[in-house]
Image (cartoon, grey):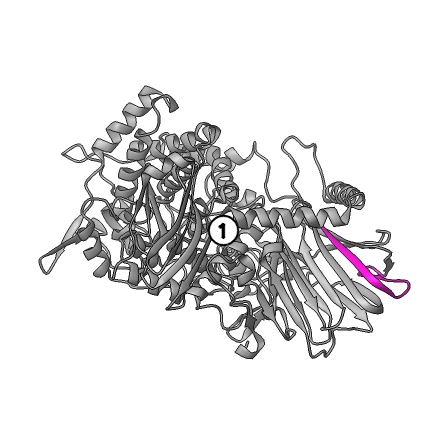
Amino acid sequence: MGASLLLVAFAACLGSGPDAYDVVWTSPSADSSGSMPLGNGDIGVNLWMEPSGDLLFYVSKTDAWDDNCRLLKLGRVRVSLTPNPFAGVKHFRQTLKLEDGAVSITSGRSDSIRIWVDANHPAVRVEARTSDPTSVVVALEPWRTEKRALGKDEAVSAYGMMEAPHPVYSMPDVIFDDADDTVLWCHSNETSIWRETMDLQGMGSWAAERPDPLLFRTFGGMIAGDGLVKRGKLELVSPTPRRTHDVNVYCLSTVPQQGTPTIDVAAVTASWRQRIAAIADADRTLNKHQSYSDHRAWWHDFWNRSWIHADGKDQARETSQGYALQRFMTACAGRGASPIKFNGSIFTVDAREGKETFDADYRRWGGPYWFQNTRLIYWPLMASGDFDMAAPLFRMYTDALPFAEARTQTYFGHDGAFFPETMYFWGAYANDNYGWDRAGKPVSLVDNRYIRWYWTSQLELIALMLDHHAHTQDASFLRDTLLPFAETALEFFDKHYARDAAGKILLKPGQALETWQDVVNPAPDIAGLQYVLSRLIELPPDAFSESQRTQWQRMLSETPDLPTRDLEGVRMLAPAQEILADRANSENAELYAVFPFRIFGVGKPDLELARKTFEHREVKGNRGWNQDAVQAALLGMADTAADLVADRFVTHHEGSRFPAFWGPNFDWIPDQDHGCNGVLALQTMLIQSEGKTIRLFPAWPKSWDVDFKVHAPYQTTVEGRLKNGRLERLKVHPQERLADVEVMLPRD
């Protein structure tokens, strides 16, 4: 989209609210590439208005998994007014109102449409108000209308099944023609790759006693409107012209529960219909004005949790807007049944790949989760205080823990649990990664060399859980989530690896991320073991048993030292103790001891060692999952961090109109790695916490002013204002934590 099509409100100033970052367009959009996102944490929409004045939007949901474990859209809806007051108007204005979590479209007269996804109910709301009476047609526009084989290129969106020994199909939706005065449709999985996956990966016996998480999963929607009547299967119309039109799209996904009697698709869809009808019936009893008031209250509370308003030179304002918009995107998708997908979240639209076009169900890398990518969405939630949005990620891994423990026994014959870098949401490998041809191979051998021995993710997840507990002090989370996961994840490392002659854990065979695929003693795993074991041991003595503490202390004493290397006489961290194969990717594995495992940093020993390592890193990048900006901030390199963050937040997808649709980079559009990495880096420039110590401005540039409210461990909030290099205001809650704050004012 050309710059003439985009007007962004840059009224940002110190102390301003989220409305300073509202996105405003003064012309309609040609297609879905000009869409705006909205969501309530589980249900999302991409909406745009065509030049004709028709409003269109895709509806999505965080757990709409099809039989191939593709995350599908629910559907597309068109709202048409006649006569249309938005067609060809000179004073068109479409505004994403961040503070209210809503989009308004106005014509310059008294005509308006407000769209919002109810923060407290599973419904998309469309409210049209026109100065003259209009008729409305609300239509479902389905595209999954028949069984269709996915071609080779499109099958990338069914990642894990691209090399399957059989065709991979997109299956049709069911549209009900007997739904009175509503448009009703769903997608129900009559087949599933789950059992095929478990059999292929040697876990068929375990799966025989467990429910299939994909089979008969059913998701879809119901369109209803005040005073609207049915016309055919796909449309609702107004019998007479009116000045007000209210439309609701209710959304529901269901999964048969364990122990459900033998079922078929007819029984499943009948049950789904009853449940979504009950949702609609209950919604009709609500006071709509109160619903919107409650919705706005949720968003106002969200924006009051935390903020960072930077101002000054060198794109500080653009950086603040990128920060706010990415945080908004995370909130729109962060409270669902499944974690946020790094490769598009729930905001994919019609796709263009080279000369080919695909529907909005397409995304590169498909449905599996890469931890290297997914983690970056969740680290920023600590400083922003959005702790509730971490729950889907933690839940996915803890739900998969019994499977991971059983797989460890099957593959290796010992206790503990391992998780691969790339996995379906229930914990299994993507089948293409695991390998379809198993002839002559042990069950534990993974074909894909990029992830064959890559088990760092569980160490980083423990680190993230430790930060979550440090901030929230949630005793039940510690007891029920963190400690059970840490115990079995670390048990794997204890049992899986032999010891060397010095009694140290010998991580062999091993790999350092995807980049160094055959090494001895990879730096990320060593850093992870050192970091999480040290922090676990520091937990209160009554948090776990003395025998558990003894095991972790022993493991820490047996963990090797971080590997180092000399470059022209300069000592630096190394990716591994021994490297036995050439570089295969572009990660700086040696810097995992800076982030995510914060062994080195401001106020910590050997800072110069880490800085030299950063300065001589082999790969320098600032897109997608490249974490240079975060590492620079942790090392106190203010100007470097600021330049990288500012560059990141002004680099969005050229083919998308919305300024926070980043990518595709290594992933897809909108790339959640890219934006969330920027969010984390900006936070880390402003605040760094370790234990009870809170460091303010450890990597903040002198030319940037800032007004902020951020979170720190021990249920602490830190609020203040820095202007012209002077701290004008500082408020810490609880007040006694003020003594733990170290203010590091920016210097030239």
- Height in image: 259 above or below 352? above
Q: Nearer the viewer, residue 129 or 393?
A: 129
Label 1 neighbour load within 10 Å: few <14, some 14-19, many 20+: many
Q: Nearer the viewer, residue 324 or 444?
A: 324
Residue at the far left: name it.
569
Residue 245 in magenta? yes
Residue beneath the point at 45% across and 36% down = 472
Please give the range of residues in magenta: 232-250
Label 1: element kind? loop
Q: Main secondary structure of the magenta part?
A: strand
Residue at the far right: name it.
240
Residue beneath the point at 35% across and 40% down = 459
Mark 1 highlights which residue? Answer: 368
Residue beneath the point at 60% across and 60% down = 37
In the rendered structure, the answer to whether residue 644 lies left or right of residue 675 reads: left
Query: Residue 737's x, y, as percent?
Result: 37, 36
What amino acid is at disc 1? Pro
Query: Residue 573's x, y, as percent?
Result: 19, 51
Does any portion of residue 600 appear in the rendered image? Answer: yes
In the rendered structure, the answer to whether residue 86 lies left or right of residue 93 reads: right
* Quadrant containing the C terminus in the rendered view: bottom left
Q: Nearer the viewer, residue 478 or 316?
A: 316
- Height in image: 593 above or below 102? above
Query: Residue 362's x, y, as percent?
Result: 56, 62
